[in-house]
């Protein structure tokens, strides 16, 4: 029996060390070669790195793989294949992922072993890239369908929360994009509704700022312009008052207009942080977790425990949780010029802010699950060790139970790992501006201010057709 205990200990130690070494590396570390190619603009090499990355080939990471493939296809200008992958990702989300076994694996090991289900803002960004792809492919009807699906996504997201005012229950940028797509199609009624819905999100927020984004002046002008085009005089007056500005009718540019999206920087990466808690019984008998400083108090979830649960076996708990680390963009500012006027960009979506705030919002709920799971594991270890002691008193060899207890303790300690996965190729921020076009050829110049304070320029040619056009440019470093 002594040999059995020794073998169990050795096996547990080796497994634990493997898990520990694996646990030291974040998701970002494990896809670093792909990430490097993305930030360098080497999209062909980035696609090759995706295909050979073993971690992203695992079934539990299928959504991440599809989103990254879709994004790289978009950046490379392969819009048709890009949407093939994004549509597959969409279908995966609609069908649902995981299930009972997936939850069990996450409970017994760690959340990193579960199927990645995506952040809420990542799901909205799928619509953004799909819509642009359809526009660039001249598939107007498909772009309109994608615009409509933004409303369904917003409704689904809003249904998740009771306190919608303080939660990320709508994506203002997606609603603005929806309005732009409708306007491009000449549907001024739906364009007004979408712009109005986006404006309402800002108006309901403190200081008209929603997750790091101040309501763009362009959006205000779009609301007023579409209200006027529809003949909605009452709505026009209402929003003039709300915005504190007077609408002035202007002639439409002969060549139409260009909506230019500037995607700057890279999304924050997730790292693992360690937190220490104790399980304490309150004066009324309720159990709760508290950190060392007593600044965090989280109720114990009894749904995870059973009659064998022992508070005596639970002392201090080491919990892991993801934290975002922002990356400083290489470019600090940009302007757009058409040869006659220079236009500034306005921030439309702040992925950095969304990532930090939405993770913070779900901290208490998710940490409660983590701590309760750890407490139940610790209790099981305690019960096993106590059983071993009991057997020893009866004169029986308790080596097997003792070895199992040690193995379980090592496994629980070293297998604990936070989920550090996220859609890495998203930009840190998206800014936009509307620039008028003349009929026929237009030379548009993008001026970028880099980290050294110097200006860099990029020139694009746009043919003014009298309609609204889109263009997005990425500086992902």
Image (cartoon, rainbow, N blue to C red):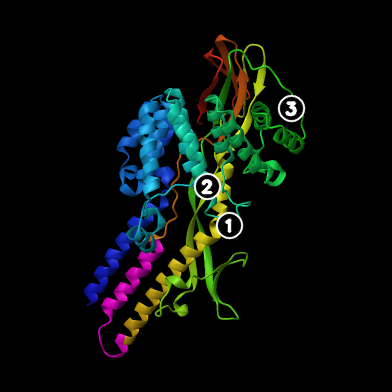
Circle 3 SS class: loop
Viewer-side residue, 138 vs 64: 138
Q: Residues within 10 Å of mark 2 (few under 14, many from 20)?
A: few
Return the x and y of residue 346 as percentages of the image width and height.
Answer: 64, 30
Viewer-side residue, 183 vs 17: 183
Q: Which mark is residue 162?
A: 1
Q: Please identify the dominant SS of the magenta region.
A: helix
**Marks 3 and 2, Cα distance to the nearest angstrom?**
31 Å
Identify the residue under disc 3.
247
Circle 1 SS class: loop
**Marks 1 and 3, Cα distance to the nearest angstrom?**
36 Å
Q: Classify residue 47 by image quadrant.
A: top left
On screen, 198 above or below 373? Answer: above
Circle 2 SS class: helix
Q: Is residue 154 visible?
A: yes
Is 410 within the magenta? Answer: yes
Is 141 within the magenta? Answer: no
| Residue found at x 66% / y 21% | 343
**Marks 2 and 1, Cα distance to the nearest angstrom?**
13 Å
Q: Classify residue 432 by image quadrant.
A: top right
Q: Residues within 10 Å of mark 3 (few under 14, many from 20)?
A: some
Return the x and y of residue 213 as percentages of the image width and height.
Answer: 64, 39
Residue range of the region highlighted in magenta in the rendering: 391-414
On screen, 102 above or below 400? Answer: above
If you read the primary sequence from the N terminus, does the residue marked by circle 3 or circle 2 appear first? Answer: 2
Q: Which mark is residue 155?
A: 2
| Residue found at x 64% / y 17% | 252
If you read the primary sequence from the N terminus, does the residue marked by circle 2 or circle 1 appear first? Answer: 2
| Residue found at x 38% / y 74% | 380
């Amino acid at each position: 029996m002594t040999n059995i205990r020794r073998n169990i200990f050795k096996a547990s130690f080796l497994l634990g060390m493997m898990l520990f070494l694996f646990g030291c590396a974040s998701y970002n570390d494990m896809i670093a070669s792909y990430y490097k190619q993305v930030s360098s603009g080497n999209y062909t090499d980035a696609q090759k790195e995706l295909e050979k990355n073993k971690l992203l080939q695992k079934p539990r990471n299928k959504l991440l793989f599809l989103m990254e493939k879709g994004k790289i296809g978009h950046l490379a200008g392969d819009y048709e294949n890009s949407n093939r992958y994004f549509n597959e990702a969409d279908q995966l989300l609609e069908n649902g992922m995981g299930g009972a076994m997936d939850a069990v694996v996450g409970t017994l090991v760690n959340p990193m072993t579960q199927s990645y289900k995506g952040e809420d803002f990542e799901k909205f960004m799928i619509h953004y890239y799909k819509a642009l792809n359809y526009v660039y492919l001249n598939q107007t009807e498909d772009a309109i369908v994608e615009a409509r699906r933004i409303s369904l996504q917003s409704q689904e997201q809003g249904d998740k929360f009771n306190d919608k005012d303080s939660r990320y229950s709508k994506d203002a940028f997606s609603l603005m994009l929806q309005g732009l797509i409708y306007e491009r199609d000449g549907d001024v009624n739906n364009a007004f509704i979408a712009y109005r819905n986006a404006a309402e999100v800002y108006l309901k927020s403190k200081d008209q700022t929603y997750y790091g984004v101040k309501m763009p002046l362009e959006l205000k002008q779009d609301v007023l312009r579409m209200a006027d085009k529809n003949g909605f005089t009452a709505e026009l007056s209402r929003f003039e008052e709300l915005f504190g500005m007077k609408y002035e009718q202007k002639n439409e540019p002969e060549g139409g207009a260009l909506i230019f999206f500037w995607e700057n920087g890279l999304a924050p990466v997730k790292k693992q942080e360690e937190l220490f808690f104790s399980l304490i019984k309150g004066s009324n008998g309720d159990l709760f977790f508290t950190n060392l400083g007593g600044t965090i108090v989280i109720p114990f979830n009894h749904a995870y425990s059973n009659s064998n649960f022992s508070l005596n076996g639970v002392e201090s708990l080491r919990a892991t949780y993801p934290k975002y680390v922002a990356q400083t963009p290489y470019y600090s500012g940009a302007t757009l010029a058409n040869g006659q006027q220079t236009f500034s960009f306005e921030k439309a979506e702040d992925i950095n802010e969304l990532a930090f705030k939405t993770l913070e919002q779900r901290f208490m709920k998710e940490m409660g699950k983590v701590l309760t799971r750890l407490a139940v594991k610790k209790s099981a270890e305690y019960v096993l060790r106590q059983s071993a002691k009991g057997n020893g008193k009866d004169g029986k060899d308790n080596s097997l139970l003792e070895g199992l207890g040690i193995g379980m303790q090592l496994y629980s300690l070293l297998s604990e790992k936070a989920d550090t996965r996220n859609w890495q190729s998203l930009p840190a921020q998206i800014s936009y501006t509307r620039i008028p076009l003349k009929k026929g050829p237009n030379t548009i110049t993008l001026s970028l201010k880099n980290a050294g304070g110097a200006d860099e320029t990029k020139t694009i040619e746009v043919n003014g057709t009298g309609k609204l056009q889109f263009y997005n440019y990425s500086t992902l470093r």
